[in-house]
Image: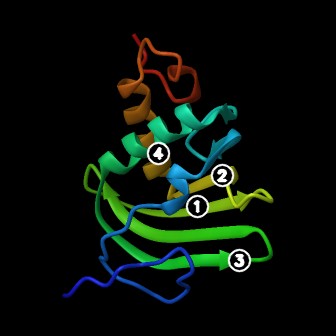
Amino acid sequence: MTSTPISAQSSYPVRRQPYYPWWLHRLADDATLEGSAMQGTVRGAEAIRTIVVDAHALQEDRELSFVGDYGDNGYLEQYTCKIHGEPTCVVVTVELNAEGEARRLAVLHRPRGSVLLFARLMGQKYAGTRLARYFVADEP
């Protein structure tokens, strides 16, 4: 399959295309991130960027099904992937501020088994760090 670049404005189905979220380098200083695999709200561009990059590192065989604008100030990504071999569906919603920066992000993982696996893996990754509190910690 040949690769076709995906622009920030694309809104057509795509498959196994190289993709890096454009909004990751356009995060507002006061950006927030919430997710189905997380406890609480992460605040700040640096922390969000770290979590998103580490989350992408856990994903294999990513297949995008939708990437594009929604509404007047939103952006949406929908894709499937595998996390440690477990099939996972992911929906990312991005609310943009007036400057076009990503201000509020919400990430939904499903099914439940994948949510719990992802939360546990991220909890292991961040054990002993300031980001650990947002994910499931291993029991002693």
- Compared across the picture, whether 129 is left or right of 81 comes to right
Disc 1, SS? strand
Determine the CA span between mark 3 and mark 1.
12 Å
The image shows residue 27 at horizontal and vertical percentages of 61, 47
**Which tag, 3 or 1, sits closer to the chain's start?**
3
> How far apart are labels 2 and 3 at the CA level?
14 Å
Q: Which mark is residue 52?
A: 4
Indicate which label's residue lies in the foreground, 3 or 1: 3
Q: Amino acid at mark 2?
A: Leu
Mark 2, other Cα within 10 Å: few <14 / some 14–19 / many ≥20: many
Foreground of the two, 53 or 110 = 53
- Which numbered tag is attached to residue 92? 1
Q: Position of residue 137 (x, y in %)?
A: 47, 21
Q: Which residue is mark 2?
A: 105
The image shows residue 9 at horizontal and vertical percentages of 57, 80
Q: Are marks 3 and 1 in contact (CB under 8 Å)?
A: no
Could you say where residue 75 lies in the image, as x and y percent from the top left? 65, 69
Which numbered disc, 2 or 1, marks the residue that appears first in the sequence? 1
Identity, as a three-letter code, of the amino acid under mark 4: Val
User: Who's the residue at 51% across and 89% down the image?
Assistant: 12
Numbered badge on residue 70: 3
Q: Amino acid at mark 1?
A: Val
The tag earlier along the polypeptide, 4 or 2, is 4
Element at label 2: strand
How far apart are the alpha carbons under marks 4 and 3?
21 Å
Q: Are marks 2 and 1 in contact (CB under 8 Å)?
A: yes
96 and 91: which is toward the camera: 96
User: In the rendered picture of this protein, how many numbered marks are placed on residues?
Assistant: 4
Residue lying at 52% horizontally and 30% vertically, measured from the top left: 135
